[in-house]
Image: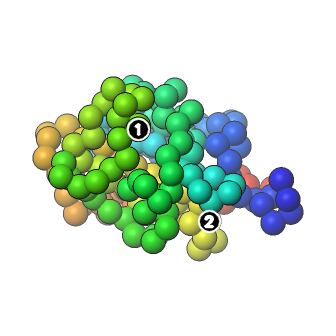
Amino acid sequence: MTQSNAHIPTPASCRREPVAGLVRRLLFEAAEAVSAPGAALWLISEDGQRMDGAVSSGAARDVIESASVPIDQSVIGTVASNGLATSIGPDDFHNPSIDELTGLHTRAMVAAPVLMRGKIVGVVSAINPAAGGLFSAGDLERIAWKAYLIGLVLLDSHEH
């Protein structure tokens, strides 16, 4: 790791305690807050070309934590690129590779950027609200709040 990347979180650094426990708890709370079966933290890869699954809560945890999607061909990549939280529905594009890996069909998704010192380092996402349909504007605010808190955890843990 170069000096300039020394404080950038990686999937491996996020899976070490105490960071993993704190992030997993916030992801669990995020999923609960938006009535989703789970939530995931995706990090921008070192080369800036992919979003790598770092920490996940929910059924497909192991699959998501070893998955990666192109930044320019995914909803989470778009959120990481433009810094805007977003919500999509069944007719909106999303990268199908994660659905194929997990066996879960994405009908709706909500995603928000994770920042450290104002720099986007990742995205928190959740899919498929329990009641069906789309995520609400309130869900978008709730996932953005949890993404903000995860950013604080990452900042605190990676400054040492």
Residue 159 location, quadrant: bottom right
**Measured along the vertical axis of the image, is residue 128 above or below residue 117?**
above
- As shown in the figure, which amino acid type bears the numbered disc 2? Met
Which color scheme does this rendered protein use?
Answer: rainbow
Q: Residue at x 48, y 34 (%)?
A: 64
Q: Secondary structure at mark 2?
A: strand
Can residue 144 be seen here?
Answer: yes
Query: Neighbour class for label 1 at 10 Å: few (<14), some, many (≥20)?
Result: few
Q: Residue furthest right?
A: 3
* 1 or 40, nearer to the observer: 1
What x and y, as percent, mark residue 125? 40, 49
Q: Please give the count of numbered marks on the rendered protein.
A: 2
Q: Is residue 150 visible?
A: no
Task: From the image, tell me which residue sits under label 1.
Answer: 97
Taking 27 as reference, is 115 above or below it? below
Front of the two marks 1 and 2: 1
Q: Earlier in the sequence, mark 1 or mark 2?
A: 1
Task: Residue 42 in the image: state x and y as whole percent.
Answer: 52, 48
Q: Tell me which residue sits at (53%, 42%) in the image.
A: 68
Q: Which x, y percent locates residue 47?
A: 68, 57
For mark 2, what is the residue? 116
Marks 1 and 2, how far apart in space?
28 Å
**Which residue is pictured at 33% across the width and 26% down the height?**
103
Q: Nearer the viewer, residue 143 or 64?
A: 64
Q: Secondary structure at mark 1?
A: helix
Residue found 23% across the figure and 55% down from its top:
92
The amino acid type, in three-letter code, at marker 1 is Ser
Which corner quadrant holds the C terminus? Answer: bottom right
| Image position of 52 with respect to 142: above or below | above
Which mark is on residue 112? none
Residue 86: x and y in percent read 32, 62
- Residue count near mark 2 (Cα–Cα under 10 Å), binned few <14, some 14–19, many ≥20: many
